[in-house]
Amino acid sequence: MWLQLWRCCALPEACVVEVYFFVRPVRTGKTTALRRWIDTCPQGTVTGVLAPDDRDVRWIEDISTRERHMLTADADTPESRVIHIGRYRFDQASFRWAQRVLRAGFESVPEWLVFDEIGYLELQGQGLEPAVRRILNWNRRIASTKLLWVVREELVSDVTDYYGLQPGEIEYWNP
């Protein structure tokens, strides 16, 4: 079931949903769709990170400032900072920066906090972890921000289990 939300619409107060899954197949324009949606929202209501790619290079972008760091580890990245997942090589320093962006974004109490994406690395305690789990736990106590997680179709069940999400805590979202 897909929940169609346009712009930055609020849900009824009685709703306990705190995590929204944005699920589409790989390489189908999820980040582009998110960027278009974010651009329609009032400034400051959406924070977090996007992971756009440009050919074979992945970036991590602060939604609030549009500052970007290269996520793909290049030949100059020291091997001690490289995270390997399949054929991909990522720079840990960029993930640490993204975690700081997520924490600062959460602390600003936005309507939405975007995590692009929750995937294989996070399920191994890497990538955007431990920031994802900490923010989820903080939000469970104060429940003031909608957490929007980009999740690959094949990982929905694994992500749900890994983070201990209950059916009432999750809703599917599509811009």
Image (cartoon, rainbow, N blue to C red):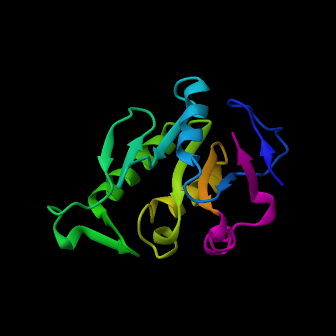
At x 23%, y 68%, the residue is: 81
Write down the quadrant of residue 118 in the picture: bottom right
Q: In the rendered structure, does residue 167 fall within the stretch colored magenta? A: yes
At x 65%, y 42%, the residue is: 144
Say if 4 sits above or below 147 in the image: above
Q: Position of residue 17 (x, y in %)?
A: 76, 51
Say if 122 sits above or below 17 in the image: below
Say if 82 sits above or below 57 in the image: below
Q: Is residue 92 left or right of residue 31?
A: left
Write down the quadrant of residue 113 in the picture: top right
Q: Position of residue 51 (x, y in %)?
A: 44, 49
Q: Report the number of discs.
A: 0
Q: Is residue 76 left or right of residue 150?
A: left
At x 49%, y 43%, the residue is: 48
Q: Give the residues in magenta.
A: 153-175
Q: Nearer the viewer, residue 5 or 47?
A: 5
Q: Position of residue 10 (x, y in %)?
A: 75, 34
Residue most extreme to the front? 55
Q: Is residue 101 left or right of residue 36?
A: left
Q: Is residue 118 left or right of residue 94?
A: right
Image quadrant holding the N terminus, namely bottom right
Q: Position of residue 50 (x, y in %)?
A: 47, 45
At x 51%, y 38%, the residue is: 47
Q: In the rendered structure, does residue 81 fall within the stretch colored magenta? A: no
